[in-house]
Amino acid sequence: MRSADSQTYSGYHARIPGGTLTKNNILIPEPLPAYCTEFPNLVERIANTTDVFRVQSTASTTSSSDGKPNQLLINEYSAGQGIAPHEDGAAYHPAVATISLGSAQCIDIYQYLSETDPSPPLTHTLREDVKLPSSNTNTADDAAKQHNGKAIAAVPLARVFLEPRSLFIMTGSLYQSHLHGISFSDTDILTPSFVSSVPIANLPLLGNPEISRTIEKEGSYRSERSSRVSLTFRKVEKVMKGGLGAGKGKGLFGLAKR
Ligand SMILES: O=C(O)CCC(=O)C(=O)O
Ligand SMILES: [Fe+2]
């Protein structure tokens, strides 16, 4: 995967809250974190490394009109920081590719509750009573329970362990009808499907052999989080002058409680 290409995107400079959108449509956060000082060379170098791996080998971005992402979002999480369950939305081509750096972190996949398409019992429960319909989500906790007035299962469907230097591609129904989020926790406990109702979906693909060994011996693996940086490549379908057209701003402006 390559980073956004200035040759194929006629962009602009725009100042937006929390960052500057460059002419390559790369969002540079402000204040500029230390790791960005050699940006975008850093991104180019990472994107060209050969030892990133896909957790979903069938994913590709080739169905986008030119096959290339035109936006890069950089998120930095300190230990304990997360992101409430959300969809990335229709403003983007339905595929997103994320390179992880720094600490490993689990991303949780959630489904909406549906009466016509019942979920397994554990995922078919709300964490607490949620009044529906309502789109008022004032806190991260509210947001974790519902999205645009639709109730979200309390327990994730699956978890994907994002190791440093890994590439995670989200597309298909994972992008279009599920939500993703990162728990507000400083530890990830990795468990296989025979132990947990929320297994690590990419266990066989993990690069660190210690994880499988520990799980085999002890039934689970404990991963302490430290600072993580994610590089999220997306294709913005419609870009309006000023940089405000790329969806409802969530992807560009960052989510609450960061
Ligand atoms: O940092 C990540 O891996 C996910 C970020 C994300 O979901 C988003 O910014 O929409
Ligand atoms: Fe997202």
Image (cartoon, rainbow, N blue to C red):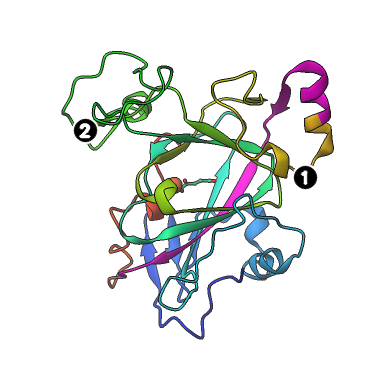
Up-down relation of residue 77 to residue 234 (above or below): above
Instruction: Kindly state the secondary structure of the residue where label 1 is placed.
Output: loop
Q: Which residue is mark 1?
A: 207
Q: Earlier in the sequence, mark 2 or mark 1?
A: 2
Please state which amino acid type lies under the numbered disc 2.
Gly
Confirm whether the magenta stretch covers residue 214.
yes
Classify residue 139 as left or right of residue 189: left
- Image quarter of residue 1: bottom right
Front in this rendered view, residue 37 or 110? 110
State the image coordinates of residue 26 (x, y, percent, origin top left).
49, 67
For image coordinates 72% across by 40% down, the residue present is: 204
Instruction: Kindly state the secondary structure of the residue where label 2 is placed.
Output: loop
For image coordinates 69% across by 63% down, the residue present is: 46
Determine crowd level at label 2: few under 14, some 14-19, many 20+ residues with C-alpha closer than 10 A: some
Magenta stretch in the rendered image: 213-239
Classify residue 139 as left or right of residue 196: left
Which numbered disc covers residue 149? 2
Classify residue 77 as left or right of residue 148: right
Q: Residue furthest top?
A: 128
Q: Residue furthest left?
A: 133
Classify residue 232 as left or right of residue 43: left
Please state which amino acid type lies under the numbered disc 1.
Gly
Confirm whether the magenta stretch covers residue 237.
yes
Q: Number of callouts in the render?
A: 2
